[in-house]
Image: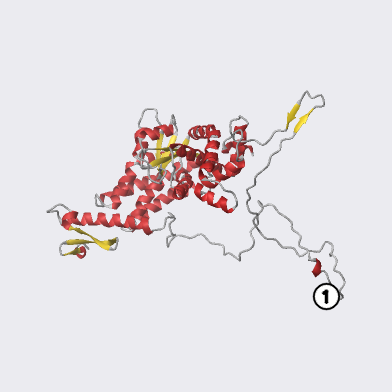
Amino acid sequence: MFAKRLEKGRFVAPWDREGGELRLTVSELALKGASPADLQLRLAQLESQLAVKNKLLFGKSSEKRPAAKDEVAPVKVPQVGHGPREQPALPVVKRLFELDQADLDCPKCGKTLAAFKGQFEESEEITVIERRFVVEKQRRQKYRCECNGCIETAPGPVKLFPGARYSVNFAIEVIIAKYLDHAPLERQVRIMAREGLVVDSQTLWDQIERLGRLLKSAKEALHLYVLSNAVIGADETRWRLLDGKGKDTGEAKQWQVWAVTAQDAVSYCIEDSRSADAARKLLGNFRGAMMADGYGVYQSLAKAPGSFILAHCWAHVRRKYIDVEHAFPAQAKEIVGLNGELYAVDRLCPTGPPGDDLRRQLRSERSRAVVERIRIWAMNTKARSLPEGGLAKAIDYMLGMWKGLVRFLDDPRIPLDNNSTERGLRGVVIGRKNHYGSKSKRGTEVAALFYSLIESAKLAGVEPKAYLRLAVQAALRGEQPPLPHEVAKAA
């Protein structure tokens, strides 16, 4: 193969870059005098890197694997037609259609048609009532006693602040549109203009920022609640802080959204770095078990005396082998299959605390043996692999985190992977794609606050807009706003 890739002493890479072939000379691949085996190894490395890049660019994003030939695929129930879907959450509005006066003449005798009592042709359709913005003229009635010793005025609506021009519901509508439906403020301005409201993005931001002040204590309490759990997940993704012209500010080109998750809540913090200090600020005094990927900052913090217990993610390990599957199909199939056996054991147990006892038993009886088979496979396969090849690197990644990978065997509360935390970052990532980031440090704080409350409401099974109304009403009464999981439990 190596000889076929040489043309007059030059290596021809099997891809194009911007329309022209990218050529690497042999001298660029290895030092002068390198052996053919060294050149072959370097070539294999380049091909492995190319395959990974191609997969990122053109491959499917799903991690689901097709069923193997010797596996029994689940039976799919054939779909018979596409009938109407029930809509129990929608209100029903009755509408009566009547004949016009001109159509009430009988075509047979000319007499007037009378309504046939109780007889209708009935049907239904789903329609939309367009959102409307209105100026609500509010008149607070005054009352007085005939003795003229007392005058009372009826209370008006609760406002975000005295003299507020826009209602609480308006502010919540803007927040939901931005942080749940990912519509930038400028896009909302254009939508509102089509609906008759002339407003600018600064006004919309003022509503968001003011409501963010009201709910600051809820965000702080939510973060403490997540850290109070015995097992949490942690992850991070990039965020941008932009100037007024849409460019990165000079403070930090890539800010980071740090996330910590529990089963029914997630809390985000947006910091200007991916450093140990930022992670330490996120985790505070947490001393439980934390699920994370192989990022070195988590490992360094876990080594500190009295720190948290670090567990590692089997899904990340699996991805490393899938990345090299093109070059090592047999080995990848074997190890991915072993990985799948761990998940098959956990699927036999109820999720959450109700399944802890059974999960502890099955992991001891079955998963421990699978983990040992994985370790033996890794040692044997690594001995037969090229030291710098893609398969060897995948094995090294797994063995390097082995201590954290096997912690789940001794604690049934620790999940196999960190996928729930990654799912918790989806809303943030979609929002980032739509409004690109924040325009100020205060913007990062407000974004972290509302993403935390909205995504936690979704995890707790509470409708986000309804939750924000409850929380804001409590805050305006001077009470501590309830957290989403508290609302769910009270329902």
Q: Quick check: 32 left or right of 463?
A: left
Q: Quick check: 202 left or right of 54?
A: right
Where does label 1 land, which residue? 107
Residue at 26%, 55% in the rendered image: 46
Q: How far across and how far down the image is residue 104, in percent?
A: 82, 69
Q: How far across and how far down the image is residue 402, in percent?
A: 35, 41
> Which residue ends up furthest to the bottom in the rendered image?
108
Residue at 83%, 71% in the rendered image: 105
Q: Amino acid at mark 1?
A: Pro
Q: Is residue 184 visible from the viewing direction of this image?
A: no
Q: Is residue 252 above or below residue 79?
A: above
Q: Is residue 194 visible from the viewing direction of this image?
A: yes
Q: Quick check: 394 left or right of 117?
A: left
Q: How far across and how far down the image is residue 96, in percent?
A: 76, 60
Residue closer to the observer: 491 or 215: 215
Quadrant (top left, top right, bottom left, bottom right) of the C terminus: top right
Residue closer to the observer: 418 or 343: 418
